[in-house]
Image (spheres, rainbow, N blue to C red):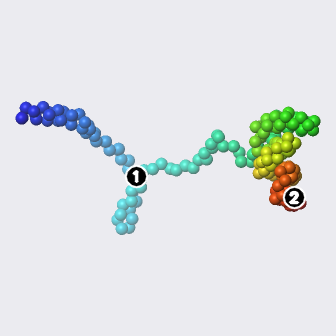
């Protein structure tokens, strides 16, 4: 029986020795520099901590853009302006497929430009797609800033509602157009 237990204990003791951490070496204390000690009338000695002075520095992050620059949504790009001119010309010539493709390219350059949604809505009305025209006009209204642009988009909605014979939408569009 002892012959069976002895090799097992020997293996366990060797495994246990291998997994024990090495003893930590004591860290030598730093040489103390004499700091002026203040003594209070009570006899209490105040020893200040050794810490560096705190210096304030302005941190400049290079990725930040100046706040004075206005948000550019792409409407000022020369390519956008050229595409919108091509769209206007194609629409005036009643080339609606050409006008639609150029306005879609312009929309990719400036996705928040309400002019693109205005032309998409007008083209959809001309193609007898009033549901699409209404959707484009609503999207354009969400981006429109000027009252002139809102008025044009509401006129597109009115025409789409008239094609659909939706009396509620017609009345709503007429009321808004009177206020604008």
Q: Nearer the viewer, residue 127 or 35?
A: 127
Name the side, left or right, on which 109 lies relative to 43: right
On the question of residue 119 being in view, the answer is no
Q: What residue would you read off at disc 2?
A: 174
Q: Is residue 41 above or below residue 161?
A: below
Is residue 180 positioned above or below 94 on the image? below
Say if residue 14 shows up in the picture: yes
Residue 109, percent from left and from top: 77, 37
Residue 170: numbered disc: none
Residue 67, image x and y in percent? 71, 48
User: What residue lies at 42% left-to-right and 50% top-to-bottom?
Assistant: 50
Q: Residue at x 28, y 40 (%)?
A: 24
- The one nearer the camera, 130 or 122, is 130
User: Residue 52: x and y, percent?
Assistant: 48, 48
Q: What is the residue that sits farthest to the left in this orientation? A: 1
Which quarter of the rendered picture does the C terminus lie within?
A: bottom right
Report x, y in % for residue 121: 83, 45
Q: From the image, tell me which residue sits under label 1.
A: 35
Q: Residues within 10 Å of mark 2 (few under 14, many from 20)?
A: some
Q: Dot 1 surroundings within 10 Å: few (below 14), some, or many (20 or more)? A: few
Q: Residue furthest right?
A: 93
**Front one among 29 and 93:** 93
Q: Nearer the viewer, residue 154 or 1?
A: 154
Circle 1 SS class: loop
What residue occupies the far bottom of the structure in this picture?
42
User: Measuring 82% from the left and 44% from the top, which residue is drawn there?
Assistant: 129
Residue placed at 66% from the left, 43% from the top? Answer: 64
Real-space Cα separation, disc 2 to disc 1, in angstroms = 85 Å
């Amino acid at each position: 029986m002892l012959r069976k237990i002895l090799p097992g204990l020997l293996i366990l003791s060797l495994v246990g020795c291998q997994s024990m951490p090495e003893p930590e070496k004591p860290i030598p204390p730093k040489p103390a520099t004499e700091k002026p000690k203040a003594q209070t009338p009570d006899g209490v000695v105040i020893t200040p901590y050794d810490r560096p002075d705190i210096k304030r520095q302005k941190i400049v992050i290079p990725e930040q853009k100046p706040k004075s620059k206005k948000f550019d949504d792409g409407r000022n790009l020369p390519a956008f302006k050229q595409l919108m001119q091509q769209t206007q010309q194609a629409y005036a010539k009643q080339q609606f497929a050409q006008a639609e493709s150029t306005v879609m390219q312009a929309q990719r350059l400036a996705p928040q430009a309400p002019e693109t949604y205005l032309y998409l809505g007008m083209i959809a009305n001309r193609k007898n797609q009033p549901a699409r025209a209404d959707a484009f006009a609503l999207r354009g209204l969400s981006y429109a800033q000027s009252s002139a642009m809102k008025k044009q988009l509401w006129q597109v909605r009115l025409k789409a509602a008239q094609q659909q014979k939706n009396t509620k939408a017609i009345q709503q569009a007429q009321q808004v157009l009177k206020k604008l």
